[in-house]
Amino acid sequence: MAETDRSPPLVGWNLKLSASSFHKLSALFTLACLIIVFSFGNPAFFSINNGLTVLLQTAVIGLLGIGMTLVIITGGIDLSVGSVLALSGTVTGLCVKAGIPVAPSMAIGVCVGAACGLFNGFVITKMRITPFVATLGMMLIARGVALQLTGAAPISRLGEAFGVLGNGSLFRIIEKGANGFPKVVFPGIPYPVILLAIVAVAAAYLLNRRQIGRHIYATGSNEEAARLSGVAVDRTKMIAYTLSGALAGLSGNVLMSRLITAQPNEGVMYELDAIAAAVIGGASLMGGIGNISGTMIGAFIIGVLRNGLNMAGVSAFIQQILIGFIVILAVYIDQIRNRR
Amino acid sequence: MNLHHAPSSTPLVEMVDIEKHFGGIRAVNGVTLDLYPGEVVGVLGHNGAGKSCLMRILSGAMIPSKGQVRINGQDAQIHSPHDARDLGIETIYQTLALADHLDAPSNLFLGRELKTRFGSLDDGRMMREAVDVLKRLNPNFKNLSDPVSSLSGGQRQVIAIARAIYFDVKILIMDEPTAALGPSETAMVSKLIKQLRDDGIGILLVSHDMHDVFELCDRVVVMNKGKNVGSHRIEDVTKDDVLSLIIKGQLPDDWVPRSQETVQ
Ligand SMILES: Nc1ncnc2c1ncn2[C@@H]1O[C@H](COP(=O)(O)OP(=O)(O)OP(=O)(O)O)[C@@H](O)[C@H]1O
Ligand SMILES: [Mg+2]
């Protein structure tokens, strides 16, 4: 009986489609268009190897975007992720240099990211400073600490093990070629891509099926109502910012591992890519709306755009201009959607 | 009349000398109020008299500047809505306090979500329970899985009411619960209030509707500029008496308790 009550009438279904799924469908459509256009422009674009390159590039934006989505749903913003990424990566690099094995070093790096996020959450909830200002402060602090710790110089020669996370892959198939040289039959699924998939599924589960996820939506939807309903609003926000920081730390490790160098200058303006991914994917900067699958599509749109423009020989400056316009367009669409 | 408590029984709620200041504004200025089990007390007053503030203090949404609250004769420390709920105090806020982007069941169970054995949300059961309680209040209730922002004011109010009665309520605060309701839903709420009263629940009803007040309340408390200017059994006053209290802050000069009128 309850089941018949659940299935909404046809009109309701149509309305639903136009609200959230419509946005996701149009984003998917945009992604497909981009892929088709770039494939026509350059046949090398639509190849397994380039596909993997895009996936790899998207992994970092995707991880940052997932954290950003959690924060944006609470009605906040996290401008510090690019800097926290750099700080976490350099801390991991310094730990490896100091002789600590790679895995614990990376764990320390991620914890530093989480600590930055926790600090953000503390400043926002206990000191009542707006997320924009609080995380802008952390953006400078984390970058400053990263540069100070390293004297602004990259840390290189970190050893082969440090590069595994960013460069290794699963199911790589290599055959001995006729000429005796090894030949890559299937390049395998890169670890960063697997990591992204795991984190995305976990985050979606958290948002949709766990109490904390429900509270994240409630907090962004109507903070006062959430508080009156007994939701621990401050705790909920702290968790969101801490997760965002931890994911920034994780993506920092992925990025530095791929370069096999800890770069305190890495990740400048990555927060904008992360915000763009979330917003293109349907997250609302007003809070209360957003989801992981949308953000993944958004991250892919940016990844494909960057990659395709690169292959088409478009300069980095023009790319910035284009992505800037796309972000404005996405936020504009978000506003139109809210006005309805 | 509806005297369900022996006069000597302990009050469910005693609010003593409550004050709430906002800078120079004294929103609540030394109010004392009590509520017995199975009693409906109307809280009346002009706009801005301090009714909502007083109710929000009892429901933990606001911390009083001064004063004491006792529940069942025991000092109670109500510092958050959570504390109030633990004491069996449920509130229908004037602002309804709904999370717009969530659907009706999510709002109904917000902060008290039902979970499966594995600790994940049991949305199926929450939906079934929500259907039960919402249909009881309004048989025509549809759109249970739409975000509540797309519902009508009346439907939203029904969700707020359902949320207050679904859980084990002992003290119910209703801040203008029928403001957005149509006649048949209002009748439903009146019936519900009588039912809850008969179950021994104490109800504080904030309302501007004299008809409702005289139909439902055992007693009225009138607030004027943050003060309690009169607490009367409903059979002792007429509508004009109450209006005079609300507007002028005092009873008509020639007032005598109506229950004693015949004696004189
Ligand atoms: N958070 C607040 N900050 C400052 N002043 C407030 C706050 N909440 C209420 N007030 C003031 O306290 C006074 C009482 O407000 P309250 O909401 O209790 O009135 P009310 O009796 O419920 O009125 P209404 O019938 O319009 O609902 C008003 O003057 C109001 O401006
Ligand atoms: Mg009020």
Image (spheres, coloured by chain):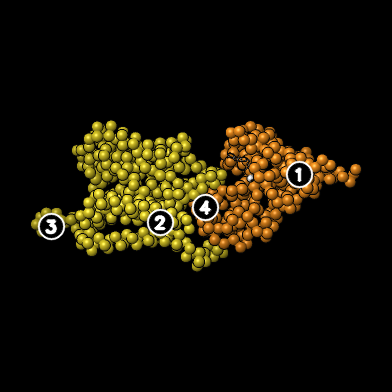
Chain colours: A yellow, B orange
Q: Determine the residue positioned at 31% across, 45% down.
A: A270
Question: Which of A129 and A219 lies nearest the eye of the viewer?
Answer: A129
Residue indicated by mark 2: A333
Helix, strand or loop at mark 3: loop
Which residue is the site of mark 4? B100
Between the residue at mark 4 and the residue at mark 1, the CA separation in whole angstroms equals 39 Å
Q: Amino acid at mark 3?
A: Gly
Q: Which label is found at residue B244?
A: 1
Identify the residue shown where x is 45% and y is 49%: A286
Going 37% across and 39% down the picture, which residue do you hit?
A136
User: What's the residue at 49%, 51% (across, down)?
Assistant: B121
Residue B194 visible from this viewpoint: no
Amino acid type at circle 2 is: Ile
Amino acid at pointer 4: Asp
Q: Is residue A4 above or below residue B176?
A: below
Decide if ligand 1 comes within 8 Å of the CB at mark 2.
no
Q: What is the CA distance from the residue labelled 2 to the residue labelled 4?
A: 20 Å
Measure the alpha-carbon separation of dots 3 and 1: 101 Å
Q: Nearer the viewer, mark 2 or mark 3?
A: 2
